[in-house]
Image: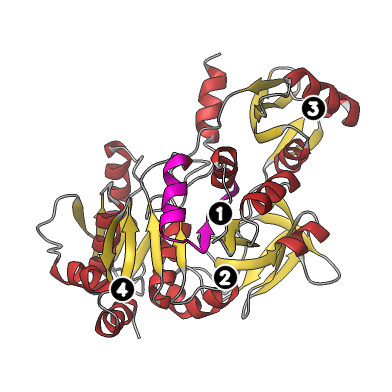
Amino acid sequence: MTIIERLEKHKQLEPSKVALVIDNKEYTYGELYDAIQSIDMDNTSGIIHITVHKANSKGVVTLIQRQSFFEQLVQWLGGLYRGRCPMVCHNEMDMDYIDELTRVIETEGAPSLAEFGVLTSGTTGRPKPLWRSEASWRDFFDIQNDIFHINKATKIFLQGSFSFTGVSNMVIAVLWAGGTVVTTSSLRPTKWIPLIETYNINHIYALPTKLRLLVRHCKSSLASIEYIIAGSQVLDCQLMEQLQQICPNMEFILYYGASELNYITYCTDEEWLERKGTVGRPFPTVQIAANDGVIYVTTKYHIEGIPDTYTVNDCGYIDSEGYLMFNGRQGDVVNKGGYKISIFSMESYLQSLQGVVEVAVIDITDVIRGEDFVVYMVLENDVELDEIIKTLHRERPSVEWPKDIIEIPILPLTECSKVDKRKLKEWYNKK
């Protein structure tokens, strides 16, 4: 059964059930399916049809340039239904990059088996297109939904553009199960909390950056939350404790995944607390191995054009009980006069310090050492930066002291909810 056929089945069985809520605007399964059926892909603004010139490639790729979550979702599903190989552009992409992306697609094409495209988050450079068959998501939905406890009773809150692979995959997986997705265009947690309370949300899907915003602004208990599903960005015990306080009935599920490979490993909060640095054990049907400190994943639920065993150049090792211990991305290292410092490890250490709310490390060029690093940090209101610096100097060797530590009120985020390190580098270079 295809994704569209599944949505049609939901319409037939429960046409009045709410499928989607966007800023208090409700859409039933009947309305969602009818919108998919009625959209005119050839005469709708914000849609570019790219004719591919490369042989043995998909003939047409459809780029969707809409800011509205509902339009992004419906046009993507409409393109999938009509075999147009749809791809949703990130909201922050300018026309110069869209023109560049169009030229790349025209020249390089998309694999003939591709049925839609996704874009990487672009945190370290230009977002790049990846190509997928529908089955590479669809056939894994029941597996991931079982791990995440997602079913027709699920009411999940998430925030972010549908163009972000994590968001789009989760949205379609919940709709596949017949659940309800609740979202908002607002980046303000004061807008999220009323939606969570009004719709009796039982699941939250968010990266730690968004969860930190939530705990900073939430003044009441969110007792309806049963599960929080979070990606494996830098996590810390303080955030976990704060989440347990505001969501006393929740179970935390941490996952590790990649746009190229889908979900890879997962663990509960108890497992994470017992094994600091773990991102869990493999999802069913997925296998992992670590060769020379590099993580290799074997799965059939991957993008087109890569083998079943593949690496995205993340580093780590597997402990004696089969848990993957994550050490960051290969090459994400500062070579400070021959002394190598892992950016991931440094961020994890700094994030663990009492009073540190959020932290980001950027690498910079240094005329003496070749490379060095700078730290941007958000602190709790009653914490002085000098105290953090004293702790750092006491606990770490001098070669691991940053060139500068800059306190800011909030870290800039990309629309994919990741720290925007390109912007931080721009800020630092303008100093």
Query: x and y percent of residue 322 in the render?
Result: 79, 71
For marks 3 and 1 on the same chain, the one whose residue lies earlier in the sequence = 1
Query: x and y percent of residue 72 in the render?
Result: 28, 56
Q: What is the quadrant of residue 359 in the picture?
A: top right
The span from disc 4 to disc 1 (Cα, nearest Å) is 24 Å
Q: Nearer the viewer, mark 4 or mark 3?
A: 4
The span from disc 4 to disc 3 (Cα, nearest Å) is 61 Å
For marks 4 and 2 on the same chain, the one whose residue lies earlier in the sequence = 4
Amino acid beneath label 1 = Leu
Q: Which residues are magenta?
A: 190-208
- Per the image, the residue denoted by label 3 is 337
Res 27 seen here: yes
- Location of residue 284 with respect to 419 vertically, above or below: below
The span from disc 2 to disc 1 (Cα, nearest Å) is 19 Å
- Per the image, the residue denoted by label 1 is 222
Amino acid beneath label 4 = Lys
- Location of residue 334 with respect to 374 vertically, above or below: below
Front residue (pair 167, 375): 167
- Per the image, the residue denoted by label 2 is 148
- Location of residue 110 with respect to 367 vertically, above or below: below
Query: x and y percent of residue 67 in the render?
Result: 28, 46
* The N terminus: image quadrant: bottom left
The span from disc 4 to disc 2 (Cα, nearest Å) is 22 Å
Amino acid beneath label 2 = Phe
Pointer 3 with pointer 2, Cβ within 8 A? no
Mark 4 Cα within 10 Å, few/some/many (few <14, many 20+)? some
